[in-house]
């Protein structure tokens, strides 16, 4: 097993959630999900053409010094997470991931168009926020008198390969279009060209990323049910929800490099599991509310709530066993706090804070799931991505809801366009 796990609070749950017959039924259900052609996230890592298509684009644009990802939600959160956790920092990365005019102006005010590649990502090909970014970039190119016939030197698209306005525009302007597979939803799409292309420009080995996702599958499909990482995690989470009304999930990596993993998880968890209706059409208004955090910073803010607030939270903690770099805290000061730190390193202090949090959670009878990875690298990040995507899909089965749609999001989009139509008429 590539990850070490520790479940605190599991012994307080009814054993029915972990009985062989129950877990066998859940493993069968998971296999049915991942082998349903509607949902491609699990097997998409075997599609080598998605990697090679991105490598070809990189070869064409490898001289670009700035990479601008234009997208929102799943079209940006995954790439941002890969950038902050694994990127080598040799290129300038900009994520146009919102439509705030002031922020957008600050991001683009000093941009050198000739050394920049703009990557527009929208599976539907009509996402308002992404299309607004396209309109802005088109205006920048027009201001420099760059004809449309040359826009393919500055832009690459990623969208659905069959039905997409962005695909149509790409064909019209002879702009390269990478594929977001039709059966992979946006929040499950980081292991597709959505994340692959920016990762390559960021010096990330995407083949190792995919390998990590493949390696973890053995644990997710393990027929030894007591050792099946996926089933044990899902039943632990669901048992806490059913028996103790623990309906909030604190996602807290002890690593600044993994801070954006929390925000990627928030969308995946909230958009997938927050649903009004179950699969029987009944109104259930269910879901598990994700809370982003990271250690040790949030020990000085949110942890007070986690320790002494309502008993409605599960802490999902990511531990990094080995850091790539470290700093000695050896010093000659006489102050007590500094002398106490002198024998240790910064990495050891982080480990101490992490272990202190676990012990404090235990003493306060607060449930947690601790996942230890050996180091922050492509193999482990790929494994974490596949694990959490699979866990989310299976939790949908536990809750008897569809984890792959987002009707609440679609309603907001519709009302936004209605407002714009009304403003235009006025």
Image (cartoon, helix red, strand yellow):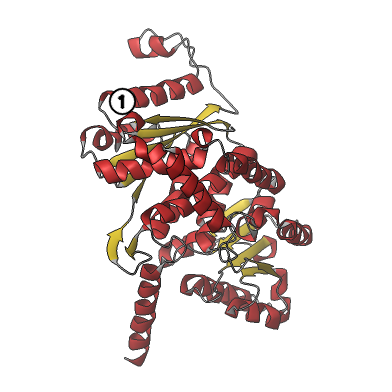
Q: Report if residue 314 is visible in the image.
A: yes
Q: How many marks?
A: 1
Residue drawn at (60%, 79%) of the image: 163
Q: In which quadrant will I find the N terminus?
A: top right
Q: Position of residue 162 (x, y in %)?
A: 64, 77
Q: Position of residue 61 (x, y in %)?
A: 74, 60
Q: In which quadrant will I find the C terminus?
A: bottom left
Q: Position of residue 302 (x, y in %)?
A: 29, 38
Q: Position of residue 192 (x, y in %)?
A: 63, 58
Residue drawn at (71%, 47%) of the image: 207
Q: Report if residue 250 is visible in the image.
A: no
In the rendered view, tell whether residue 20 sits above or below residue 33.
above
In the rendered view, tell whether residue 408 sits above or below residue 354.
below
Which secondary structure lies at badge 1?
Answer: helix
Q: Nearer the viewer, residue 203 or 179?
A: 179
Q: Which residue is mark 1?
A: 362
12 relative position to 393: left or right: left
Quadrant in the picture for residue 286: bottom left
Quadrant in the picture for residue 415: bottom left
Residue drawn at (61%, 52%) of the image: 92
78 relative position to 67: left or right: left
177 relative position to 33: left or right: right
Residue drawn at (71%, 73%) of the image: 152
């Amino acid at each position: 097993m590539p990850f070490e796990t520790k479940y605190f609070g599991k012994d307080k749950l009814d054993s029915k959630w972990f009985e062989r017959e129950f877990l066998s039924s859940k493993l069968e259900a998971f296999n049915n999900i991942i082998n349903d052609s509607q949902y491609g996230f699990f097997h998409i890592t075997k599609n080598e053409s998605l990697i090679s298509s991105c490598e070809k684009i990189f070869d064409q644009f490898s001289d670009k010094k700035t990479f601008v990802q234009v997208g929102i939600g799943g079209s940006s959160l995954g790439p941002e997470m890969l950038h902050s956790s694994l990127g080598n920092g040799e290129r300038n990365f900009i994520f146009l991931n919102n439509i705030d005019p002031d922020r957008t102006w600050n991001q683009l005010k000093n941009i050198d168009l000739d050394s920049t590649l703009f990557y527009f990502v929208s599976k539907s090909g009509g996402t308002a926020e992404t299309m607004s970014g396209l309109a802005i970039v088109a205006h920048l190119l027009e201001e420099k008198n760059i004809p449309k016939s040359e826009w393919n030197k500055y832009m690459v698209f990623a969208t659905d390969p069959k039905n997409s306005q962005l695909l149509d525009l790409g064909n019209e302007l002879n702009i390269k279009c990478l594929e977001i597979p039709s059966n992979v939803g946006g929040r499950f799409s980081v292991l597709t060209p959505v994340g692959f292309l920016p990762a390559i420009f960021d010096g990330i080995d995407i083949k190792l990323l995919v390998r990590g996702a493949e390696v973890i599958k053995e644990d997710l499909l393990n027929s030894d049910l007591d050792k099946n990482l996926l089933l044990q995690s899902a039943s632990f989470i669901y048992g806490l929800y059913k028996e103790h009304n623990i309906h909030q999930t604190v996602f807290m990596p002890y690593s600044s490099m993994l801070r954006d993993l929390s925000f990627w998880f928030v969308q995946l968890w909230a958009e997938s599991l927050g649903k009004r209706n179950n699969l029987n059409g009944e109104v259930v208004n269910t879901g598990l509310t994700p809370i982003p955090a990271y250690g040790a910073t949030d020990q000085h803010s949110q942890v007070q709530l986690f320790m002494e607030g309502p008993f409605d939270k599960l802490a999902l903690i990511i531990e990094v066993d080995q850091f790539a770099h470290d700093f000695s805290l050896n010093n000659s000061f006489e102050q007590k706090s500094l002398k106490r730190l002198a024998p240790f390193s910064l990495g050891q202090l982080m480990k101490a804070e992490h272990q202190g949090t676990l012990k404090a959670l235990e003493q306060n009878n607060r449930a947690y799931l601790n996942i230890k990875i050996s180091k922050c690298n492509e193999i482990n990040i790929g494994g974490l991505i596949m694990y959490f995507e699979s866990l989310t899909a299976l939790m949908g089965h536990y809750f008897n809801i569809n984890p792959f749609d987002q009707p609440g999001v679609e309603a907001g989009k519709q009302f936004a366009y209605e407002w714009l139509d009304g403003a235009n008429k006025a």
